[in-house]
Image: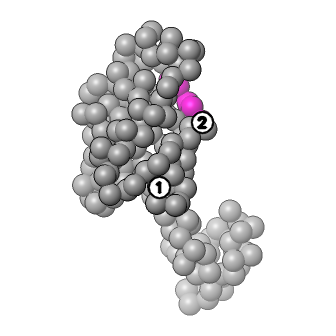
């Protein structure tokens, strides 16, 4: 259910038809259940909103599903946005996030996937915390060569 201020905003913002879904946890949960029925989603909690009038609205939150909590963001775009086409290319290439909903007006992206931060899944993977990845040595400055291993403490300080 939308808060009164959000309801007023969705009525005024005609350029973002999916804005009401992005700001309404119940409506968003319904859309996600329809798109991913095997997920067993039980709740959506919204925590962050970045609104760009007439352009887009990014909403961050947490999805409760199958006993786990997953951070996510969903973005409401204006019809015909080129950014949606870019998101669809990422999904086609990876077979994973993001999930384009409502005919391209709404894009759901679970953590750790990000269109601009492509190495974020590596940082979020506990299996990579103790090892090197390309560019790591320049970041943490503790590796002595290509076969050396970074310690979790040196990476933690670098990030």
Q: Are marks 2 and 1 in contact (CB under 8 Å)?
A: no
Secondary structure under tag 2 reads strand
Give the class, few, some or many, for how many residues have Cα within 10 Å of label 1's Cα (few <14, many ≥20): some
Confirm whether the magenta stretch covers residue 53: no
The reply, left or right, for residue 104 in relation to residue 144 is: left
Confirm whether the magenta stretch covers residue 51: yes
Secondary structure under tag 1 reads strand
Residue at image coords 71%, 69%: 156
Comes first in the chain, label 2 or label 1: 2
x and y, in percent, of residue 8 in the image: 50, 11
When asked about the image quadrant of residue 130, the answer is: bottom right
Where are the magenta residues, as a range?
A: 48-52
- How far is disc 2 from disc 1 in space, using C-alphas? 20 Å
Q: Which residue is mark 1?
A: 65
Residue at image coords 53%, 19%: 6
Q: Nearer the viewer, residue 30 or 75?
A: 30
Q: Is residue 114 visible?
A: no
Please, is residue 13 above or below residue 19 in the view?
above
Residue at image coords 35%, 21%: 17
x and y, in percent, of residue 100 in the image: 30, 42
Q: Which residue is mark 2?
A: 48
Circle number at residue 46: none
């Amino acid at each position: 259910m939308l808060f009164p201020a959000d309801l007023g905003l969705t009525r005024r913002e005609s350029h973002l038809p999916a804005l009401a879904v992005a700001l309404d946890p119940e409506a968003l949960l319904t859309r996600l259940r329809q798109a991913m029925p095997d997920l067993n989603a039980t709740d959506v909690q919204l925590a962050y909103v970045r609104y760009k009038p007439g352009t887009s609205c990014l909403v961050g939150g947490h999805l409760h599903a199958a006993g786990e909590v997953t951070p996510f963001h969903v973005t409401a775009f204006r019809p015909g946005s080129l950014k949606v086409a870019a998101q669809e290319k990422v999904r086609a290439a990876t077979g994973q996030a993001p999930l384009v909903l409502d005919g391209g007006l709404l894009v759901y992206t679970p953590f750790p996937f990000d269109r601009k931060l492509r190495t974020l899944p590596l940082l979020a993977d506990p299996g990579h915390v103790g090892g090197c990845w390309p560019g790591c040595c320049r970041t943490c400055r503790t590796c002595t060569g290509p076969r050396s291993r970074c310690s979790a403490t040196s990476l933690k300080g670098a990030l």
